Amino acid sequence: MMSMVTLRKAAFLSAAGLVLAGCASGPKPLYQWEGYQTQVYQYLKDGAKEEQVLALESGLDKMKAKGGSAPPGYHAQLGMLYLNLGKGDQMVKEFQTEKTLFPEATPYMDFLMRNVKTDARKDVSAGAATNAATSAATNASTKAKADTAEAKSDANTGSAK
Amino acid sequence: MMRRILTYIAGLGAATLFAGCAVPTKQIDYSAYKASRPRSIVVLPPLNESPDINATYAMLAQSTAPLAESGYYVLPVALVDETFRQNGLTVPGDIHTVPVAKLREIFGADAALYVTVSEYGSKYQVLSSVTRVAASAKLVDLKTGDVLWSGSAAAATDDSGNAGGGLVGALIAAAVAQVINHTVDRSYGVAGAASDRLLSAGQPTGILYGPRSPKYQSD
């Protein structure tokens, strides 16, 4: 008897919940966003900065604490920032995580890693970043983020032209 | 048994009430969309018709959340922008003319989203200022080049606090509040609301739910 009452209550509550979900607010978000959009915006405006890495890393800690899922692009963004800071190994790890969480990312992540690796034969990380910094001067855009840009582009097999 | 019956009743009740609040007067032809069923979307850097140069990046940064919460994988937007730069494409107008086959080859995405920002920024009026962002978008199948969906939306600060209207409304509202608190800039927050309206599934003429949403193929 008790369990029936509970069930009935549960059924009512779930119905009510669904109605609210339909009309007003949303259902539970699929992802825990933390500062992803803001960090991406900062990157696009000002280039890669150490603070962005710290913000995204602390976001990951919060996701772990709350049991949330990282949104699409989160690990890839962090990986790119790592490369900018000369941490190529950590970039690879983040790109792999992006692929594991989202197999849809595989072709693009592989494309990026191929380009970084062929470019920096001697050293995936520091070397690439330093080389890039030099050649970045020739780039019209001399934002800090040009490091990554060049590191990835030099060996670009698929030009978008 | 009892549980199943009650679940059924609950479901039925919800469905009835739900039907009451949304009037699906869809005038969009979704047949190509439903035939294509894209899983992943690459968002191209938006065209900017406004005088504010921040519009492109603000919309780009704000485009991931509504699409992802609608059930799609969205390629990392900043990396995509970077890849275009490496290939000498720094102007959205040029990027939007890249052949779909090339986009598919590089990004491996099922579809591309082409966004145009028509208004972005604050207008100072006699007694107050209004920050307004308006944008349109089209979703294109990268295998066929077919347009799967197109739409437009706007948001402004004089709208009520109800930022979304879409399903990620609460989420975006929180993000907007956060952003304003962090004084990034006001237009950026409004761009989030506009993007949410433009790119959330579950609206009469909106995009459809993607494979990662529990509501996939329910629309």
Image (tube, rainbow, N blue to C red):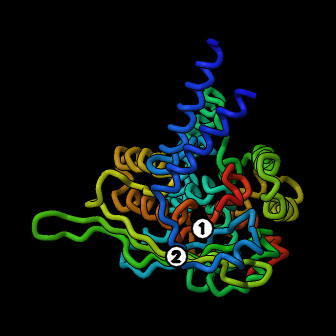
- Residue at coordinates 71% horizontally, 84% vertically from top-left? B146
Query: Is residue A122 positioned above or below B84 on the image?
Result: above
Find the distance from the CA under tag 2 to the CA under tag 1. Answer: 9 Å
- Crowdedness of circle 2 by 10 Å Cα count: few (<14), some, many (20+)? some
Q: Where is residue A78 in the image (x, y as percent from the top left)?
A: 66, 48
Residue B134 can be seen in this image: yes
Extreme-top residue of the structure: A2
| B110 relative position to A121: left or right | left
Quadrant containing the C terminus of chain B in the rendered view: bottom right
Task: Provide the residue designation for mark 2.
Answer: B151
- Residue at coordinates 67% horizontally, 39% vertically from top-left? B8
Mark 1 — on which chain does it sit? Answer: B
Amino acid under disc 2? Gly
Question: Would you identify the image quadrant in which residue B36 lies?
Answer: bottom right
Mark 2 — on which chain does it sit? Answer: B
Residue A52 vs residue A69, the one in the foreground: A69
Q: Dot 1: what SS?
A: loop
Task: Provide the residue designation for mark 1.
Answer: B207
Do callouts 2 and 1 mark residues in contact (Cβ within 8 Å)? yes
Q: Position of residue A143 (x, y in %)?
A: 55, 64
**Badge 2 and badge 1 both on one subunit:** yes
- Residue at coordinates 82% horizontally, 54% vertically from top-left? A103
Q: Where is residue A85 in the image (x, y as percent from the top left)?
A: 66, 48
Quadrant containing the N terminus of chain B in the rendered view: top right
- Residue at coordinates 48% horizontally, 64% vertically from top-left? B23
